[in-house]
């Protein structure tokens, strides 16, 4: 659906070990980085515009948005937002500058007549979105006044007892510190970018306010209440504004969806009521009274920005970047203080349109809470890793809803479930209840169109978790005439009390074999599902689905996610669609965790109105806990130990965040230096105007170093936000094998003043190539301020790849050692490329079906065998082999399966998939002719590297090294065949467990 441009697949461990190190080569024999010596002299390249699967593009103008414009145009005063100030869209300089941007848009659009403009962007992003052809997008990208053109991609939507659980309510809680429930979030506006809301829910009823509060809101609120065309909404003093954005989504929504801010699928209603639903609302699910509920900031105001739409029968929310950026732009210009964004997004870039819009939102003083994603528990799955937002992980609640299933053999099993249960009924495995031609895999998952009503009617069906939504499985059981469902985890994961179409019990993976054995091995198996019952359990645990760090961007030098909040079995208001005709439902995901943080941020903002978004973020992070309710370290819900890549700084504790003592603040200038230091923009980019920093030096509440080459010093600055002077002393916890030195050894802090300290981290026997976690805790007589540490010591810091040319030559490789001892270096290869070719025709121009790959006239399938024991495999195509305008995509699968091992889908024919330490065996490689000539020969180049002598040698093979010491090795080759592409590898080791690599690429 989306088109990305990773030059090298992100899963490469070698990149994580040495990203950011420039490619260095011997001047006499080497090409320049990113160039290919075998190519003819290059013509000026077309802008790298990625094709849009939606047919829409987001265009960024050269001019700055309102939040950034510094007055460098004659006759137009500066509009940039100063620290501590708000963006005021009615101010005369802003109005004048917006007119200027309108003129710039008109000039740009004149270059591509006939395109359909969707939105103007002025405040957090300067530009517009429009429907246009790919050719027009490329033409526009070349036009004067245009900075970039990127596709508008599709994104997707990623509590009664929670105030007690988190410490908002009760004696000494955050609400009491704020001045009471009626002051919790008072005067603060939360913007919800989601799927809309249901105005009739009691959570959104008018509330009693004061004249002072109303005046404060009126002063900053410049938004509107857009009723809509279908099922119109009305606003009140709780929901003070509502708008919807559908120009990008077009005609994709289902007929049942509403062309208005009204919510259909229920996601937006749930998140909005969680963040700021009214206090003391009675909540009932399937006839059971669960008590009185409240949002986190019950007296905050809400502004609804509907940018997600139901596009299929599941009701799940989907939206385009064009609509989402428009919603962000509107929310900031309307005057919101907080944005909740429970929507999917990339974790590998800081500078896409959404990231830049949030950058300017933060500059304008808006706190942004974003979901970390629901693609866990794998490493490096966390999304939206921008340092200027707060990324939220999903933790479990200490209130669970459990039910019991009793099998006919008398055994009972307890899991998650709500509802009235079922009487004793026959039970059948889904795999034995399928239609004649049902796919066996889909059948066990109870997917649509697989269950046979003749085999299901009147029975309880056992379904495996996975692929389709949990609630969709029970719907399929109901549609086939079933009376109940036993939902089984096949791998460790959360147990979710969803609102199902039939009574359901959700059991963990440890019980699954016993249940299946009984049902399959009994002549007439039966089961009885009991009614759901609220119980207390130990919490929090990190939900299996919650996306994990380390961050795909930043080389591990920024810890993400930031913090954890309850996101499993969260009870809140929703739509009739999601509540089986009712008003409330339990939902799970980081989407549900995020509005807890947005609401808590609103409570902090109402108590401390001058605090910046980063001060609020710091207050929550440095007072979070990494222990569960029993006082033990937080675990994953699978029972394994958790770590900060799952929970960030820990579970939020708002009652301590109200008075954190010290905060780590940062500004727009700091964030631009961070982006510049990331290497994601060239040094000439405007975001590099203030220089760059090492990413680990961003003044962040946590300290992360993903590439510790022996020794590194980072700097932090803290600000006393208390009312009295305090003296703090440091204590380092954890990080076994690392020597941590803090200077100075005490901090004397004065109210409102800032103090700087340094932390030097040196490897002192820590395991190489793996993270060590710990804490730096500053403690005074009154406050404890904790910073999580995440440090990865490297064997060596070396270039990811070096390039050379010629049938004979050499290249020097600079190295920084991460340890003291002996460095051993060996060479593999060089191997000549194996080239497979075929002819393709009729370029597809559509996204490759990654879940169902197959060859056709524009897709070739090659099968290659990776020898067992190979250290590295690469599959490449090259621009130099094709006419201009050719666009190829490459996908590598485990042979005969749909298991995708890697892909490369840029906007050209230069594609590359790398598999470090691959599992031996055959792989299927699909090459898709996405665009280009009607008929085109395609060449797949591939290499599989193994240990053994070859034409590449290295010297010295062994040398002494010191911690953080500099060293050099020289790679030399001879006797290569001319006109051939070769690949080799240098392998570094400490003689024990530490290892690293550099790829050597030679064009002879």
Image (cartoon, rainbow, N blue to C red):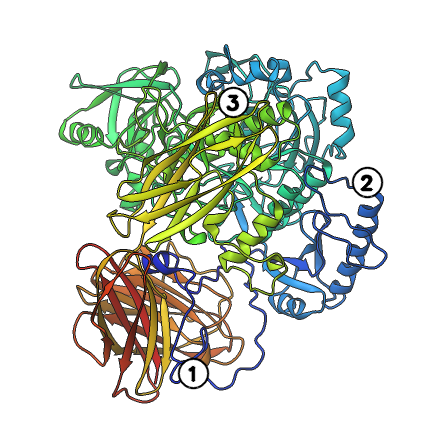
Q: Which residue is under mark 3? A: 572
Real-space Cα separation, disc 1 to disc 3, in angstroms? 61 Å
Few, some or many C-alpha atoms within 10 Å of disc 3 (few <14, some 14-19, many ≥20)? many
Residue at 30% from the left image edge and 44% from the top image edge: 738
Real-space Cα separation, disc 2 to disc 1, in angstroms? 56 Å
Q: Is residue 815 left or right of residue 780?
A: left
Residue 625: image quadrant is: top left
Residue at 78% from the left image edge and 50% from the top image edge: 78
Residue 379, percent from left and from top: 35, 46
Q: Which residue is under mark 1? A: 37
Q: Is residue 903 left or right of residue 64?
A: left
Q: Is residue 20 left or right of residue 505?
A: right
Give the secondary structure at mark 2: loop
Chain-order first, disc 2 or disc 3: 2
Kindly report which numbered mark, 2 or 3, lies closer to the viewer in this rendering: 2
Chain-order first, disc 1 or disc 3: 1
Image quarter in which the C terminus is found: bottom left
Q: Are marks 2 and 1 in contact (CB under 8 Å)?
A: no
Above or below, 400 against 850 in this view is above
Give the secondary structure at mark 3: strand
Residue 61, percent from left and from top: 69, 59
Kindly report which numbered mark, 1 or 3, lies closer to the viewer in this rendering: 1
Q: Which residue is under mark 2? A: 90
Chain-order first, disc 2 or disc 1: 1
The answer, for residue 778, to whether it is visible in the render is yes
């Amino acid at each position: 659906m989306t088109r990305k441009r990773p030059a090298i697949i992100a899963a490469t461990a070698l990149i994580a070990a040495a990203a950011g190190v420039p490619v260095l080569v011997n001047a006499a024999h080497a090409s320049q980085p990113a160039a290919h010596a075998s190519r003819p002299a290059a013509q000026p390249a077309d802008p790298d515009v990625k094709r849009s699967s939606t047919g829409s593009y987001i265009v960024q103008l050269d001019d700055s948005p309102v939040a950034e414009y510094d007055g460098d145009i004659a006759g137009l005063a500066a509009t940039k937002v100063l620290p501590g100030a708000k963006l005021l869209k009615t101010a005369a300089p802003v109005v004048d500058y917006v007119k200027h941007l309108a003129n710039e848009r008109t000039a740009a659009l004149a270059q591509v007549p006939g395109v359909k403009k969707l939105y103007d962007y002025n405040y957090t992003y300067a530009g517009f979105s429009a429907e246009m052809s790919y050719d027009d997008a490329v033409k526009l990208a070349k036009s004067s006044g245009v900075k970039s053109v990127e596709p508008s991609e599709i994104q997707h939507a990623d509590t009664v007892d929670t105030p007690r659980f988190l410490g908002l309510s009760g004696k000494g809680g955050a609400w009491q510190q704020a001045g009471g429930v009626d002051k919790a979030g008072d005067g603060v506006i939360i913007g919800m970018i989601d799927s809309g809301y249901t105005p009739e829910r009691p959570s959104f009823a008018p509330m009693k306010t004061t004249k002072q509060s109303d005046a404060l809101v009126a002063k900053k609120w410049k938004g509107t209440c857009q009723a809509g065309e279908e099922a119109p909404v009305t606003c009140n003093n709780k929901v003070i504004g509502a708008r919807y954005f559908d120009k990008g989504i077009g005609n994709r929504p289902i007929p049942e969806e509403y062309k208005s801010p009204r919510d259909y699928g229920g996601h937006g209603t749930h998140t909005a009521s969680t963040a700021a639903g009214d206090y003391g609302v009675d909540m009932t699910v399937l006839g059971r009274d669960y008590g009185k509920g409240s949002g986190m900031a019950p007296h905050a105001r809400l502004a609804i920005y509907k940018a997600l739409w139901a596009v299929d029968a599941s009701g799940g929310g989907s939206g385009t970047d064009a609509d989402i950026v428009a919603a962000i732009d509107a929310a900031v210009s309307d005057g919101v203080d907080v944005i909740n964004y429970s929507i999917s997004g990339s974790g590998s870039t800081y500078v896409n349109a959404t990231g830049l819009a949030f950058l300017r939102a933060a500059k304008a003083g808006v706190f942004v809470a974003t979901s970390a994603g629901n693609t866990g528990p794998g490493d490096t799955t966390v999304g939206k890793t921008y340092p200027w937002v707060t990324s939220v992980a999903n933790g479990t609640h200490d209130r669970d809803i459990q039910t019991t299933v009793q099998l006919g053999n008398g055994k009972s099993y307890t899991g998650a479930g709500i509802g009235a249960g079922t009487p004793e009924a026959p039970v059948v495995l889904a795999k034995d209840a399928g239609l004649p031609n049902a796919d066996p895999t889909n059948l066990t998952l109870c997917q649509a169109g697989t269950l046979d009503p003749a085999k299901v009617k009147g029975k309880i069906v056992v379904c495996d978790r996975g692929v389709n939504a949990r609630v969709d499985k029970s719907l399929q059981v109901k549609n086939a005439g079933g009376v109940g469902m036993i939902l089984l985890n096949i791998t460790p994961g959360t147990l979710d009390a969803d609102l199902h179409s039939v009574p359901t019990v959700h059991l963990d993976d440890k019980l699954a074999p016993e249940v299946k054995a009984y049902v399959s091995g009994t002549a007439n198996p039966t089961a009885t599902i009991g009614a759901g019952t609220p119980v207390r359990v130990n919490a929090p645990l990190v939900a299996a689905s919650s996306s994990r760090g380390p961050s795909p961007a930043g080389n591990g030098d920024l810890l993400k996610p930031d913090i954890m909040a309850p996101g499993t079995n969260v009870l809140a208001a929703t739509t009739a669609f999601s509540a089986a005709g009712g008003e409330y439902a339990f939902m799970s995901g980081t989407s549900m965790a995020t509005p807890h943080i947005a609401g808590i941020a609103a409570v902090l903002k109402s108590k401390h109105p001058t605090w910046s978004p980063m001060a609020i973020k710091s207050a929550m992070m440095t007072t979070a806990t990494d222990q569960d309710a029993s006082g033990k370290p937080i675990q994953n819900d699978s029972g394994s130990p958790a770590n900060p890549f799952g929970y960030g700084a820990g579970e939020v504790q708002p009652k301590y965040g109200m008075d954190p003592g010290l905060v780590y603040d940062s500004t727009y200038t700091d964030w631009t230096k961070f982006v510049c230091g990331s290497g994601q923009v060239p040094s000439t980019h405007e975001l590099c105007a203030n220089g760059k920093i090492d990413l680990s030096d961003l003044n962040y509440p946590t300290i992360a170093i993903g590439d510790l080459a022996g020794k590194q010093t980072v700097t932090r600055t803290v600000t006393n936000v208390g009312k009295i002077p305090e003296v703090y002393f440091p204590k380092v916890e954890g990080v076994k094998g690392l020597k941590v030195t803090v200077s100075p050894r005490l901090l004397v802090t004065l109210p409102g003043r800032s103090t700087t300290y340094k932390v030097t981290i040196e490897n002192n026997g820590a395991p190489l190539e793996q993270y060590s976690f710990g804490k730096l805790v500053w403690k005074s007589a009154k406050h404890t301020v904790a910073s999580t540490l995440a440090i990865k010591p490297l064997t060596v810091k070396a270039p990811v790849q070096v390039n050379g040319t010629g049938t004979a030559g050499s290249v020097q490789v600079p190295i920084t050692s991460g340890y003291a001892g002996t460095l051993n270096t060996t060479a593999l290869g060089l191997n000549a490329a194996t080239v497979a070719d075929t002819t393709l025709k009729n370029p597809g121009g559509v996204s490759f079906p990654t879940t169902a790959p197959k060859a056709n006239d524009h897709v070739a399938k090659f099968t290659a065998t990776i020898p067992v024991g190979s250290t590295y495999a690469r599959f490449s195509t090259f621009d130099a082999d094709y006419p201009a305008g050719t666009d190829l995509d490459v996908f590598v699968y485990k042979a005969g399966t749909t298991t995708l091992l890697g892909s490369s889908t840029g906007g050209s024919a230069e594609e590359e998939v790398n598999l470090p330490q691959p599992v031996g065996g055959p792989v299927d490689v699909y090459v898709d002719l996405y665009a280009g000539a009607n008929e085109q020969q395609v060449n797949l180049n591939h290499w599989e590297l193994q240990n053994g002598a070859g034409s590449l040698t290295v010297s010295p093979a062994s040398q002494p090294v010191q911690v953080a010491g500099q060293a050099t090795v020289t790679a030399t080759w001879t006797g290569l065949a001319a006109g051939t592409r070769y690949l080799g590898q240098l392998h570094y080791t400490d003689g024990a467990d530490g290892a690293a690599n550099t790829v050597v690429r030679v064009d002879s």
